Image (spheres, grey):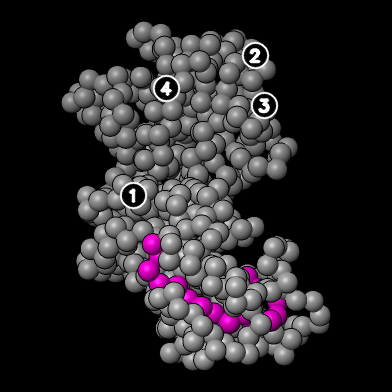
Amino acid sequence: MKYAIIAAGEGSRLREEGIEVPKPMVNLRGEMLIERLIRIFKSQGAEEISIIINAHSPELRRYLEGVTEKDGLINLIVETTPSSAHSFYAILNNSCRPFEELCLTTVDTIFSEDVFKSYIDDFNSRKDIDALMAVTDYVDDEKPLWVKTDERNKILEFSSCQKSERALVSGGIYCLRKKALSVAFSAMEQGVERMRNYQQMLVESGCEVFAFNFGKILDIDHAGDIDKAEFFIENQNKRVLCVGRAKRFSVGCEHKDKRLFDLICQALQKRGMRVCVVEEDDLCKEHLQGVCSVVSMARGKAATDMLDYVCQSATEVLNSPEGVRNCSRERFNVLLQDAGIPIPRFILLRHRNISSIRRENFADCNSLWIKRADALTMCAEDVVPARNDKELADYVDRMFARQIDHCLICENIEGRLVKVYRIAESEFLEYFFPSANKFSDLENISGEFPDINRKFLKRLSDKVARVLKLCVFGMDLIQTKEGKFYVIDVNDFPSFSDFALQAAEVICDKIEGLCNRKRM
């Protein structure tokens, strides 16, 4: 495919703010804007790179003529044009051969190289579309061109005002095929002077125009944008490994867990980070090489043992393998009890004889819970209530018949169930009262309860986080009518339910902080 760069602008705002070099020669982390784009396009197998500059930048012209002599890919066009649309037309008119496909961008567009590769791959794989336009939900333009799409990301309209709930604007990168390019010639004949008007013409002419969300795209319009762009590019060198949870550990929450995981991966990419995604069953040591941090929803022994390897190299894992292990029912009950955190009375059962245990430990309890203790919950039968001695004996027999070698017998605390989501060392704390379920007579008794003190919940959850060495977790609490709280369950990396979007951003803040701390 052929590529083209519009670099013919005057860069007047940058000059007014003290930047003396032409905009295409602005340096970002040791690389000029024009140099960066040439390198990226060549990495995608560019057959030709057309570059248009104005006639008033002799320094830029000398540089590009030198590059052209060394590199036969460059087609340099020197022409002063009144607008970016005119520059586009000049590129079309100065090509040695008509373009079959073209990727066009302006010189000051800053984007993730990994996302750009995905963008080109997507365009190459979809031969039935006429144009694939970069869009971004990062709106930092003085006059953005808003993009309205349908559920398939087909573009329905370009406009100067937002007309849909999705906040998407044009990103200034265009992949175009013959039909879309022919519309450009029509636009030229009609005197269309703005690229935004050309884009709307594509839709109105019946072209199949689709959007590709880059996440974050920046433009260099002001001197202050240079620091933003350098920080964004620096993030690209931060490789984050995201380890997805196996379905067997997402009992009843498979889609919610997947949604949170996808939101985290997308948010990291939007920040410019290089994201490597792997499912926990496929994780191997090669995935752990060269990562600055790891986001892991893994729960299986093989994956958590593997992640111990990366922890030895001082790479942070969120949540840590130790924290995940501490969420096993036997371990977290022992650890919380030793730390003085209120939990229901419990006893570990390694045999089927329960009569003496009930008399000695739970004589005053009307109901008990039988909970699998040798592993995390895998199915609904791993946590069941026993309302009488017969149910208790039956459920214990079933546990051992399933080759579960030990289980917990816990007292039932009367009160209301409170679900808590927490990200440690942040302001993120959400709680709610779940809707009724088949165990509501045990977990959600009726009546008046004291108001919940958010500061108390924060202190309690932070103590749990310290004891269990967790960062991202959920807790199930029982609040009694007297206002006392008991921790009855702890989950590492929950789905966050309706709070997933907010949680994903806070988790990304944590990861970004970990990467920066490691670099320092």
Mark in front: 2 vs 3: 3
Mark in front: 3 vs 1: 1
Closer to the N terminus: mark 3 or mark 4? 4
In the rendered image, which quarter contains the C terminus?
Answer: bottom left
Magenta run includes residue 280? no
Q: CA distance from mark 3 to mark 1?
A: 41 Å
Give the extent of the magenta segment: 403-424
Q: Secondary structure at mark 2?
A: loop
Is 279 placed left or right of 354 in the picture? left
Amino acid type at mark 1: Asp
Amino acid type at mark 2: Ser
Mark in front: 4 vs 1: 1
270 or 217: which is nearer to us? Answer: 270
- Which of the numbered marks, if any, corresponds to residue 281? 1
User: How many other residues sit within 10 Å of disc 1, few (<14), some (14-19) or many (≥20)?
Assistant: some
Q: Which residue is mark 3?
A: 156
